[in-house]
Image (tube, rainbow, N blue to C red):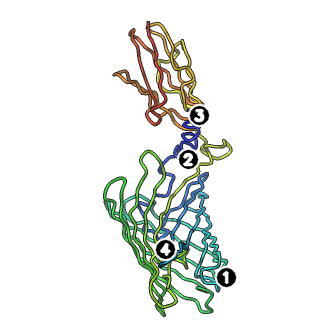
Amino acid sequence: MKHVSLVALVFGVASAAEPLSAQSLLYRPPNLNGTWVGEPGVVQFNFLHRFYVGEGPFHEVQNFPTFTFETGLGHGLGIGWHFGTRSIVGPGRQTDNESEWFVRWRPVGAEGRSGLTAAFTAAYNQLAHSGDGEIGVDYAVGRLTLSGAARGMTHPFREADAKAAVAGGVVVRLTDYIAVSADIGSQVSPTRRAAWSAGINFLIPGSPHTFSLQASNAATSTIQGNSRGLVRFDGSNWVLYGFEFTIPLHLKRFSPWFKGAPKPAAVGGPAGAAVAAEIRMAAFKFQTDSVVIAAGQTVRWVNGDPVEHTITFDGTEPGSPPVPHHGTFSHRFDKPGTYTYHCTPHPYMKGVVVVK
């Protein structure tokens, strides 16, 4: 049980965030960073891992990861950092690490809303020594989102002359939890090998996390990296396969210093009711798994875990909504009987109230 509780705690801390504060891969194609801007007090961490499996007899695996960190500053403004390895942007060509620092401002719309959303991104690519920019637009109607981007780079791929690039993509949400997406983008004047991608994207139920299985020929997910495809020495295409996982870290859940820290909530129970028994929820278990009270008395549950729990009765007795960290739920039992209950997100948490 200790191992189960530890695993549940690790997953629970990550998944107890509000989904509206997290970037969703159900609204953007893999190679378009989109118009999303985070909220203050939330650090968005995306792990994009692509790889190439070489030909026999050794079938060497070459990895192309990109890490993204972004946080919101309020008023539609966010800052972030992309870090990728095996970049084709620098002189080493697949031996260099690439850093891109960026600021994004979204004056129109929001991710997930119908209609037009627009954002402006200013970035500096440290490997290319290039000042880069992007205008991104999304148009969502029903389960369809169309995306586009116009990009400019002062020293693309360490070339002396400034260049422009364009990109476009589409996302189709098949259900509330599954979407398919694709995009293509390329430098213009002169046109280079286009960067493309396709993916199938999933929202993990009951969490703010999304997951995507992808195929692409782009190495790093930066403005420059998404504007030119990989080319083998013989001129043929590379095809990389991989996944992307989005992890929002809600700092307000770890410290009250951040704006919007949740306040303890008290739900259920008649006002002024005397509490006959109190049950604490901690370490992903009901610390007192059985209590005996008299009819007409009230039981109060207190959540000491950093994630939400519920008190869900196995019969017809009304239970609780999600009880936040430090929140309480009170319920008066008017009729004698045995009332078994559990936590819906964590069904191995069980208890019983015996009413005499």
At which x and y percent is residue 129? 67, 82
Residue 280 vertical position relative to residue 298 in the rendered view, above or below: below
| Viewer-side label of 2, 1 | 2
Residue name at image x 41 percent, y 58 percent: 112
Q: Depth check: 146 or 356 in front?
A: 356
Mark earlier in primary sequence (2, 3)? 3
The answer to which quarter of the image holds residue 281 is top right
Mark earlier in primary sequence (2, 1)? 2
Q: Amino acid at mark 2?
A: Ala
Is the Cβ of the residue at disc 1 closer than 8 Å to that at disc 4?
no
Q: CA distance from mark 3 to mark 4?
A: 39 Å
Q: Which mark, by number, is residue 9? A: none
Q: Amino acid at mark 4?
A: Val
At which x and y percent is residue 273? 51, 14
Q: CA distance from mark 1 to mark 4?
A: 31 Å
**Local crowd at mark 3 within 10 Å, few (<14), some, or many (≥20)?**
few
Is the Cβ of the residue at disc 3 closer than 8 Å to that at disc 4?
no
**Local crowd at mark 1 within 10 Å, few (<14), some, or many (≥20)?**
some
Q: Amino acid at mark 1?
A: His
Q: CA distance from mark 2 to mark 1?
A: 36 Å
Secondary structure of residue under mark 2: helix
Q: Depth check: 54 or 334 in front?
A: 54
At which x and y percent is residue 237? 44, 84
Residue at which label 3 appears: 2
Q: CA distance from mark 2 to mark 3?
A: 19 Å
Position of 177 with respect to 33 (left or right) is: left
Residue at which label 1 appears: 129
Residue at which label 2 appears: 14
Residue at which label 4 appears: 53
Q: CA distance from mark 3 to mark 1?
A: 51 Å
